[in-house]
Amino acid sequence: MFDLKAYLKVKQQAVNAALKTLWDDTEPYPTPLVKAMRYSLEAGGKRLRPILCIGATEAVGGNEADVMPAACALELIHTYSLIHDDLPAMDDDDLRRGKPTCHKAFDEATAILAGDALLTAAFEILATAGRHSENDALKWLEVAYLIARAAGYSGMVQGQMIDLSVEGREITLEELERLHRLKTGALIEASVMAGGVLGGGSSQEVVALGAYGRHIGLAFQMADDILNIEGKPETLGKPVGSDQVLQKVTGPSMIGLEEAKARASNLIEHALEELKNFGIRGEPLAALGRYVIERNK
Amino acid sequence: MFDLKAYLKVKQQAVNAALKTLWDDTEPYPTPLVKAMRYSLEAGGKRLRPILCIGATEAVGGNEADVMPAACALELIHTYSLIHDDLPAMDDDDLRRGKPTCHKAFDEATAILAGDALLTAAFEILATAGRHSENDALKWLEVAYLIARAAGYSGMVQGQMIDLSVEGREITLEELERLHRLKTGALIEASVMAGGVLGGGSSQEVVALGAYGRHIGLAFQMADDILNIEGKPETLGKPVGSDQVLQKVTGPSMIGLEEAKARASNLIEHALEELKNFGIRGEPLAALGRYVIERNK
């Protein structure tokens, strides 16, 4: 029986160790800018995107060390997006995972710049990995392209833009799912595809991994919204029911709790279906898929 | 005699034409996000960085079409930096080149996201160019690396961070020049180096181009600060003397107007010195160098 808990722990440690080495501590570092970048990066994320990237590369026979720069880049981009989303002009959040948000711990200008610097550093890391590996140069360019496309004006940034624009107006379930696909799904999809590309997966394998990523991305968001209603504040680390207080439109609020759970399960079934040709190597991704809807935080 | 005015006009048109094709106009585009990106991108920049990139590639025998993706990426990054610098939490500017800044024309959230999306799009463009050219894959990775390093936590973003931190306190000329080297110099240096790399320049040539870029970057900033004192508001498109009103520390305010002019001339002499081995091919860059301190806007 595959032990997901142990797998997550080992991979989180590996990712955290790699993230620690990104910026050195000799003068003039850490600058106040790098301190703010690190503050948010080390605020206790689950490292889901890096682990999906590693799991995907293992699914096609690649190995962790080879994709670590991509895993780090994905976490930097995820972290930058949280910092900017929390800004007063956006969601105006004071707390994230129980700690002051970046603009509260530092100031607004520093938070904007820390986000900008994390996003830029992600591409510096990808380019650095690529320029040192002549044989894999095209793979790294492909990965930089996949990640940039998923993160930018036709992906994550566009999702945040739509999220801000739907506040307080009625939307359809289709619009809501498009929003989630862009805002969280696109980068999750890119995470698994990046792992597949770098591990030398065939184009069919990369396509299957992308489909897996799309399904679990939507299920992840649905599960988050269900936890916001049903979760325990002590395990969740934040108050439950905040979406209802804010009258935020979510999957459960539109189609009801039971229907939302059925939809999340169905998405995971479809995700696991995509893994059927990977055999035993796909087991970590399969377990991660089940975890997405079974977790309690 | 080399006709810089005609050269600038032709190159600006070529860059503007390339920028126009970056995002298509079929549904769902242009989204409000892409509209905001375009608004700032088309607000009348001189396209200095793209033209330096093109001039540098011509100096090593390369050609314009091959570097156009890099030229566009540089302008996108420059534009994103202006949008974020103008934000209320930063310099809080309502006007840029006589037009409302992005957050005034749209809103603050849109401006933050438009900046994020422009920065991300720059790397999408570089990665796209690289993945379509197997022979030049390593060159594009090198260029993405140079640009990311120049734009990020050890370059432009760090420069803006220092700029915010020095407001209202005494600094030395060395500190001021370091600030300018990071905030404007680094990306200008990367612009010419990128052109050199993509044009197939030798490492000595790329190093010489980088040194040229560093010198004109500092001269450019000094000339800007001189124009802020001596320029004519009707050619400049903004009020003169605004730095004095804001008690902003500049080169001229620290060492006096005459000394500042001598320093700018001296920097340009050093820049031109770096071009001596490029012969006739280096003429556009030489003329651009002279223009930096002779322009009246």
Image: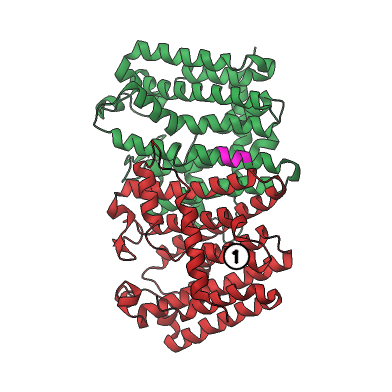
Chain colours: A red, B green
Picture layout, residue B161 above or below residue A95:
above
Q: Where is residue B239 in the image (x, y as percent from the top left)?
A: 33, 27
Q: Where is residue B278 in the image (x, y as percent from the top left)?
A: 67, 18
> Residue beneath label 1, please?
A192
Q: Which amino acid does label 1 sit on?
A: Val
Foreground of the two, A219 or B244: A219
Foreground of the two, B267 or B35: B267
Q: In this view, does A183 lie to the left or right of B225?
A: right
The question of residue B144 being in magenta is answered with yes
Picture layout, residue A2 above or below residue B75:
below
Magenta residue span = B142-146
Q: State the residue at coordinates (31%, 60%).
A: A92
Picture layout, residue B113 above or below residue A98:
above
Q: Where is residue B154 in the image (x, y as percent from the top left)?
A: 45, 38
- Image quadrant holding the N terminus of chain A, namely bottom right
**Hey, which quadrant is residue A147 in on the image?**
bottom right
